[in-house]
Image (tube, grey):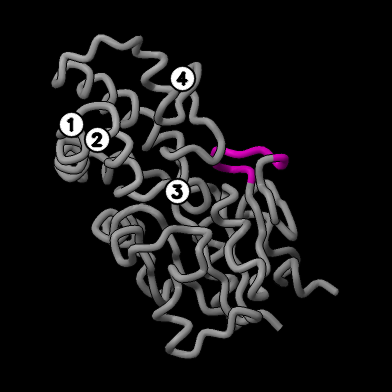
Amino acid sequence: MKKVIIYDKDGTLLDYHKIWIPYAHRCISDFIDEFEINDDPKELAETFGIRDGEIMPNSVIASGTGKDIHHAFEGIHEGGGKWAKAYYENSLDELHDNMVLIDGAVEALKTGQKLGYTNMILTSDSRQSTLNFIKKFELEEYISEIVCGDDTPYSKPDIRVLQDQIEAGLNLKEVVMVGDNSADTLLGKDEGVTTIGVLSGTCESVHLEGADHIVDSVKDLFKDGKFILDES
C-alpha cells in the first residue's frame, strides 16, 4: 500500500497560469529594458519556454528551479542571473497576492490525510515562496514536509532531491508523486515510485512521460472516499 503522497506545487496545487505567466512576461520585458537587449522579444521569450504567450511543456520556466532559470538569464547577458534572482526576490509579495489554488486542492490534502496518507510537497520553487503559499491557504496541518528548489543542489526528476528523506527512512515503493510535468512523472521510476500526472498545469498527456496514471487534476485523485490507486 502507498503511504506517502508527494505533490508538486505549481500547476498541481496552485494555478500556474494565474501566477507565473504574468510574472514571466513582465520579468522578460524588464530584463530586455535593463540590459538594452536588441534580440527579438518573441525569440528571447522562447529561450525560456514561452511561445505565443503560453508556457511550453517541460521547459525551463515550467519545471526548472530558480537556479536553472537564473542560469538561463545569465546565458543571455552577463549579470542576468544575479539580476533575475533579485527580481524574483523583490516580487515575492506580488507572487503571494496572485496565488490561486487549483479547485479541489485542499479537499485532496484533507482526504488523503484522513485516509492515513502523509502529504508532502516537492517543488522547484523556493522555500520562501512555498512557505508563503502554505501560510496563505492555511495548509500547515495537512502537509508534513516540504522540499524546495533551493533546499538541494539536485532537481527533479533526480531522485536525490529526496536524499535526506530517503536517509531518514522514506520507502520509495510506498511513495506516489503527483505533478504536472515530466520532471514529476519521471521521478524515481527506477526506484519504485508511482507517478500520477495532472493536466491542470503546463502539459498535455503526451508530455507526461513515465506517468503511471493521468488525471485532469488533483480533484480526481479521490473517488467515493478512496484514493484512486486503492480502488481495486
Q: Which residues are magenta?
A: 199-206
Secondary structure mostly seen in magenta is: loop
Q: Are marks 4 and 3 in contact (CB under 8 Å)?
A: no
Disc on the earlier residue, 1 or 3: 3
Image vertical order of residue 39 relative to residue 89, above or below: above
Mark 1 = which residue? 78
Q: Earlier in the sequence, mark 1 or mark 4?
A: 4
Name the quarter where the N terminus is drawn.
bottom right
Q: Residues within 10 Å of mark 3 (few under 14, many from 20)?
A: many
Which badge, 4 or 3, comes first in the chain's sequence? 3
Question: Considering the image in quadrants, where does the C terminus appear?
Answer: bottom right
Q: Which mark is nearer the camera, 1 or 3? A: 1
Which residue is rendered at x = 33% and y = 55% of the image? 133
Residue at 44 percent across and 87 percent down: it is 167
Tell me the SS state at disc 1: loop
Disc 2 residue type (three-letter): Glu
Mark 2 neighbour class, 10 Å CA radius: few under 14, some 14 to 19, many 20 or more: some
Decide: marks 2, 1 in contact (CB < 8 A)? yes
The numbered disc on residue 11 is none
Q: Which residue is mark 4?
A: 53
According to the picture, the residue beneath numbered tag 2 turns out to be 74
Mark 2 or mark 4, earlier in chain: 4
Distance, label 2 to label 4, CA atoms, is 22 Å
